Image (tube, helix red, strand yellow):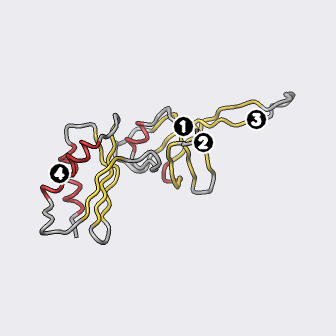
Amino acid sequence: MIDKELLEKTVAEAIADTDLFIVDINIGASNAVNVEIDSLTGVDIDECARITRHIESVFDRDVEDYELEVGSAGITSPLKVRAQYEKNVGNTMEVLTRDGRKLYGVLASVAPGGPLDRDVAFTLEVSTKVKEPGMKRPVMKTEELPLISADCKYVRYDLKF
């Protein structure tokens, strides 16, 4: 079995002095290794190939048989670390809370913390129709909802077009 700590250290070495950050590293039972990275400016295939080569230079396939995939966090993937939330301030997001509410709104702010923190406090601006007293038609009101990622099943890009 591949040593996850050594793998994390190896990936961290490969992305040092770049704006890349680790989103997630998974090692399956059959040594299927999946490294998910992101950056504030985007991830290109050359970066993924460079990181793959660096990992392969440390983990010898003759000693440890493994399958390796290095890729960027996809647009349909949920946000996992604070740096991804910070990157998406101002973007429209879809949030599914643990109590089953599905919310759509703009990611307004993210509480301070470390870039790789997984427990993230954030504020979502949500627009709702409200019937004001004396008005014939409902009007749109925007409210800010403070949320914590731990209270959400997922937070991801709103892909409605």
Q: Position of residue 75 (x, y in %)?
A: 44, 45
- State the mark number for residue 104: 2
For this rendering, which residue is in front, 51 or 110? Answer: 51
Q: Which residue is mark 4?
A: 53
Q: Position of residue 107 (x, y in %)?
A: 52, 37
For marks 4 and 3, the one nearer the N-term is: 4
Amino acid on which disc 1 is placed: Thr
Of badges 1 and 4, nearer the viewer stands 4
Q: Which residue is mark 1?
A: 92
- State the mark number for residue 142: none
Of badges 4 and 3, nearer the viewer stands 4
> Which residue is at a point 49% across and 41% down the rendered structure image?
122
Q: CA distance from mark 1 to mark 4?
A: 35 Å
Asked if disc 3 and disc 2 are in contact, CB closer than 8 Å, the reply is no
Provide the secondary structure element on which disc 2 rests: strand
Q: Residues within 10 Å of mark 3 (few under 14, many from 20)?
A: few
Q: Position of residue 95 (x, y in %)?
A: 56, 47
For this rendering, which residue is in front, 130 or 33? Answer: 33
Tell me if residue 28 comes above or below residue 103 in the rendering.
below
Q: Quadrant of the C terminus?
A: top right
For marks 1 and 4, the one nearer the N-term is: 4
Asked if disc 2 and disc 4 are in contact, CB closer than 8 Å, the reply is no
Quadrant in which residue 21 is drawn: top left
Q: CA distance from mark 4 to mark 3?
A: 56 Å
Tell me if residue 145 comes above or below residue 70 in the rendering.
above
For marks 2 and 1, the one nearer the N-term is: 1
